[in-house]
Every structure is written in structure tokens, then in C-alpha cells.
Image (tube, rainbow, N blue to C red):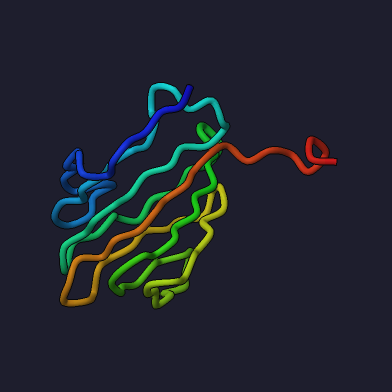
Amino acid sequence: MYEKESDSDFQVVREAHGGDGAIRIHGFFQETLRLPVRVAVWELDPGASEGRHAHGDERPLEEMYYFLEGEGVMWMGEDEVAVSAGEAVLAPAGVDHGLRNTGDRTMRLVIVWGTPSDQEDNE
């Protein structure tokens, strides 16, 4: 048995974490995935952003952003990091972060997030 999904069915989220514009999001296997992570494809039009935010003590999450198309900027703490297709950025739990599409075409990325485990759990 297997499951198959397409990324063509997007949910539109406006002003995510206080950002600008809308992000089209398709979360894969949201009801059935048993792994300790979630996976989604995001699309941001030029100028759209995910506002600065952190996932800390109440709900610690790590997020990995992998950019498929377009270009933009990510904010990681006090740093501003240019991003483009083929690059990945890790937002550790508790670190203030966000992103903006600064290009002239749609930014498309995969985001994977989950609760970080202790190093002791991995040994």
C-alpha cells in the first residue's frame, strides 16, 4: 500500500507571522505521516514574506528551508542571508527568523520542520 499526493492543491495563508502578502502552502500527508517531521511546499510571489518569529520554549521547532526556485532574503537572528535555488537554511529552535521573496518571480521552496531531539536520544 502507498499514498501519493500532488503539490497542486494549495492552502493560502495571508500575512504569515505578520509578514506581507500571501503564501501558498501544500503540506504533504498531514493526516497520515508518522515521521516526527512535517513537509510542505511553499510559494511566495515577489514581495511576499513570512514575518520574523521564533519557535522556542512552549513549542520548540527546528525548520529547514530548501529553495527550489527564485531568490530572496532570510533573517536569522541579527543576520540577513541571501538565498536562492539550490540552497538550504536551518532555523534552530528559539532563533528569530523569517524570509522575503526579493526576486521578480515566484519563490518556491520546501520546508521541513519538527521538534528537535536531545543529542543523547541519537546516541
Q: Position of residue 67 (x, y in %)?
A: 39, 65
Q: Is residue 12 left or right of residue 5?
A: left
Who is closer to the viewer here, 107 or 49?
107
Residue depicted at x 38% and y 50%? 53
Q: Quadrant of residue 5?
A: top left
Residue depicted at x 52% and y 37%? 37
Count up the numbered dots. Answer: 0
Residue 9 in the image: above or below residue 68: above
Q: Position of residue 20 (x, y in %)?
A: 17, 57
Residue depicted at x 42% and y 51%? 111
Residue depicted at x 31% and y 68%? 69
Residue 120 in the image: above or below residue 34: below
Residue found farthest to the front: 1
Who is closer to the viewer here, 2 or 108?
2
Q: Is residue 115 left or right of residue 81?
A: right
Q: Position of residue 81 (x, y in %)?
A: 43, 75
Residue 46 in the image: above or below residue 30: below
Q: Position of residue 79 (x, y in %)?
A: 47, 73
Residue found farthest to the right: 123
Name the quadrant of the C terminus. Answer: top right
Who is closer to the viewer here, 60 or 9?
9
